[in-house]
Image (spheres, rainbow, N blue to C red):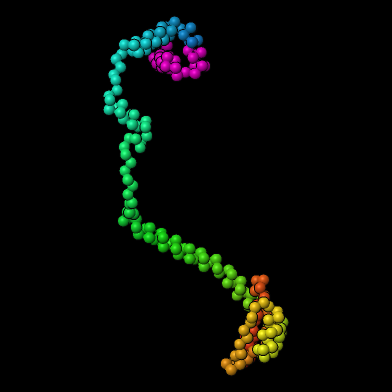
């Protein structure tokens, strides 16, 4: 048997004596001990050495300071020392500018987000207004009620939509009233007044 094999067998025997082997390992050790008397003698020598160390070797007692520390540690951190009052710590000066920049970025981002959220609604209103104007121009009849009398346009619109409509007379300013129509923005009917400016109509 080589030295390497002897070392392996010795480690195997020590593991068996220390209870580190499972059931299959112990069965293998017992089979090897039965087959090899020299190995069985080595196992008996190691077992006797272990027992002698347990019974004859001095056992120094742990110092009282170590015992006290172990008792304090077993009772938790609150028992080990009184809790110090927590103090409000100001932010490290090196990070104050970073924190200020971060807060500013959050505020700007929140403002831009709310702006982008409101933009689609505004765009939808603008598209509906333009679509109503284009529809009136393409149909060749840009008004539903054609009259320059604002006292006739107002009651006609009041019968078509809810809420009062103010009809302003701008003839003195060069914008005579042509009439009015009802456009739909989203799902809401709205009053549209059409004025004339030279060759052009303005709704």
Name the image quarter holding the N terminus. top left
Residue 135 falls in image quadrant:
bottom right
Q: Position of residue 140 (x, y in %)?
A: 71, 84
The residue segment tinted magenta is: 1-29
Return the residue nearer the eye: 81 or 2. Answer: 81
Residue at 70% of width from left, 79% of height from top? 160
Q: Is residue 5 above or below residue 133?
A: above
Name the image quarter holding the C terminus. bottom right
Residue at 41% of width from left, 59% of height from top? 102
Residue 155 falls in image quadrant:
bottom right
Residue 53 relative to residue 34: left or right:
left
Main structural element of the magenta stretch: helix, strand or loop? helix
Q: How many marks?
A: 0
Residue 12, can we see it? no
Q: Position of residue 2 (x, y in %)?
A: 41, 13
Inspect the magenta stretch and tell me whether residue 63 lies in it: no
Q: Position of residue 117 (x, y in %)?
A: 55, 66
Q: Position of residue 65 (x, y in %)?
A: 27, 27
Q: In this view, which residue lies farthest toward the top?
A: 37
Q: Is residue 198 above or below residue 60?
A: below
Q: Is residue 157 above or below residue 47?
A: below
Residue 136 relative to residue 20: left or right:
right
Return the residue nearer the eye: 73 or 109. Answer: 73
Return the residue nearer the eye: 28 or 134. Answer: 134
Residue at 34% of width from left, 29% of height from top? 71
């Amino acid at each position: 048997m080589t030295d390497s094999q002897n070392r392996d067998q010795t480690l195997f025997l020590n593991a068996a004596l220390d209870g580190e082997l499972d059931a299959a390992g112990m069965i293998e050790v017992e089979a090897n001990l039965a087959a090899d008397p020299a190995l069985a003698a080595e196992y008996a020598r190691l077992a006797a050495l272990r027992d002698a160390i347990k019974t004859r070797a001095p056992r120094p007692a742990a110092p009282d300071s170590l015992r006290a520390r172990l008792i304090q540690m077993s009772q938790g951190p609150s028992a080990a020392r009184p809790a110090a009052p927590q103090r409000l710590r100001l932010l490290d000066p090196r990070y104050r500018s970073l924190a200020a920049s971060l807060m500013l970025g959050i505020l700007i981002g929140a403002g831009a987000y709310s702006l982008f959220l409101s933009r689609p609604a505004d765009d939808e209103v603008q598209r509906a207004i333009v679509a109503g104007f284009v529809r009136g121009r393409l149909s060749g009849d840009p008004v539903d009620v054609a009259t320059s009398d604002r006292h006739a346009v107002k009651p006609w619109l009041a019968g078509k939509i809810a809420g009062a409509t103010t009809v302003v007379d701008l003839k003195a300013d060069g914008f005579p009233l042509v009439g009015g129509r009802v456009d739909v923005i989203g799902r809401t009917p709205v009053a549209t007044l059409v004025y004339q400016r030279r060759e052009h109509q303005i709704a």
